[in-house]
Amino acid sequence: MFSTDTYVTRRGGLQKRVSSGIVLLMGNGEQPMNYKDNTYPFRQDSTFLYYFGISAPDLAAIIDIDENRTIVFGDEMTMDDIVWMGRLETLQQKALKAGVRDTRPRSALATALRAALEKGRPLHFLPPYRAANAVSLSMMTGIPVERVAAQASVELIRAVVAQRSIKSAEEVAEIERAVNLTVDMHHHIMRLAKPGMTEQQLAAEVNYLAEREGATLAYPTILTVRGEVLHNHYHGNVLREGHLVLNDSGASTAMGYAGDLTRTFPAGARFTAQQREIYDVVLNALETATDALKPGARYLDIHLLACRTLAEGLGALGLMRGSAEEAVAAGAHALFFQCGVGHMMGLDVHDMEDLGEQYVGYTDALPKDTATFGLKSLRLGRELESGFVITVEPGIYFIPELIDRWKGAGRFEQFINYDKVEAYRNFGGIRIEDDILISDTGHRVLGKPLAKTADEVEAIRKQAIEN
């Protein structure tokens, strides 16, 4: 946990942003894998962590805006709990670390909510992303379960997003711990991988390094020789000479803050000439987009800049033709780059995504494009502010099924050289990703240096293969 003052100050800031009534923040419970006592690893709700810092299941809290009081609801350990798990810190002790003196049994929560509702007091809660919390909210408030998410408080969502978007110095330090461990994970894999190994062997090493350092994975590892599958969690392939290996993995610290990096490297000692050409196009897009980061810049414009840079590079290789600006405006580049160039990062690897991209990544003046292929996958479009932590992750992906569909329909033939593209249909994909803090004067790439240029990557791979 951070200091007690941190959580008291955060809650005080929230109280100033919510006009009146009761704020209800739901923690997460444990989720059974196959029977009640065999659960998935526990992860506390990120917003509950932000305001209370307590990573324990089955908690909830009320912040009473009008009466200026905070209550944490949860149950102390029973004797059976102590027998099976040993004596742990009491809820009262945990709450005191967060600056809360009033703790009550979980069963008292429903009574407190009903009393507030009977008085006609506004009740603010966030949209639940777990079914158990949706059911619990329905039972306590009388809102039909299928309507609970729609009844979430937009005022509270906006207040939480406003606070969590701007990372404090202590948050940045914690994120950088996650990023530094993630750098170590990536260098380890880059030095370990050899033809004949399986993706699963390497993915297991990613998990081992995170857990060895007291961390967990921020998200399921993407480690694949089929990098054109954007979120490929299948690890059954064998590395062969000539393959590209895409490693998108990140650590999450014990406090819940995430790292998220991607590197792509050859399974052998060197990139082929074709691979290196595409790699350099992606790297140029990463560097061009990163150089443009500063407060006030719209991330939508950063995304489009990366797209134009990719289109220009592909044009120089003969895969695209015509004006890069016109090609991007028409959407032709999305044959090769189907996703957004980055997203917010913090306590969640896609920070606050449960609260809604329209509030986190966009504004009323800049609504999200939910229809255009490519743009609909851009999670962040709004103006950047000092204190944002974001990813920048351009890529080029050759998806055979997509190539066949667009070619068959004759889409964007004025911009795409399909005859040339055919020579790349089994290429796979390349993504290069950094984590970046927006500062008052511009930006800073977070974490220790991680091999990025083709020469730096090949130097590591050559040593790995020779050893």
Image (cartoon, rainbow, N blue to C red):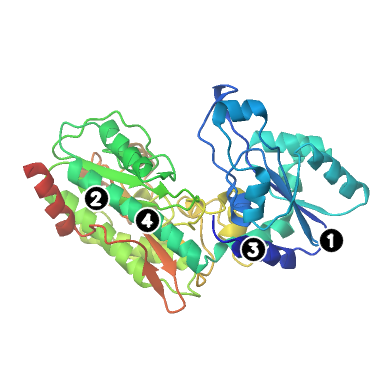
**Disc 1 from disc 2: Cα separation:** 52 Å
Name the residue located 25 percent from the left edge and 53 percent from the top edge.
319
First reached walking from the N terminus: tag 1 or tag 2: 1
Q: Alpha-carbon distance for marks 1 and 3?
A: 17 Å
Q: Which mark is residue 231?
A: none
Q: Give the residue number, with chain letter if any, for mark 2.
A: 187
Where residue 207 sits in the image (x, y, percent)?
35, 39
**Viewer-nearest of labels 1 and 2?**
1
> Residue 324 location, x and y as percent?
33, 64
Residue 368 in percent (x, y) is at 57, 57
Please provide percent x and percent y for residue 212.
Answer: 34, 42
The answer to whether residue 78 is visible is yes
* Quadrant in which residue 18 is drawn: bottom right
Quadrant where the N terminus is found in the figure: bottom right
Please report whichever mark, 3 or 2, sits nearer to the chain's N-terminal start: 3
The reply to whether discs 4 and 2 touch (Cβ–Cβ < 8 Å) is no
Q: Amino acid at mark 1?
A: Glu
Mark 2 Cα shell of 10 Å, populated few (<14), some (14-19), many (≥20): some
Q: Which residue is mark 1?
A: 67
- Horizontal arrangement in the rendering, residue 135 relative to residue 221 (left or right): right
Element class at badge 2 = helix
Toward the viewer: 8 or 276? Answer: 8
Name the element at disc 4.
helix
Label 3 SS: helix
Mark 1 or 4: in front is 1
Marks 3 and 2 sit apart, C-alpha to C-alpha, by: 36 Å
Disc assigned to residue 179: 4
Which residue lies under the disc numbered 3? 10
> Residue most toward the top?
35
**Mark 4 is on which residue type?**
Val
Q: Please state which amino acid type lies under the numbered disc 3.
A: Arg
For mark 1, does the 10 Å Cα neighbourhood hold few (<14), some (14 to 19), or many (20 or more) residues?
A: few
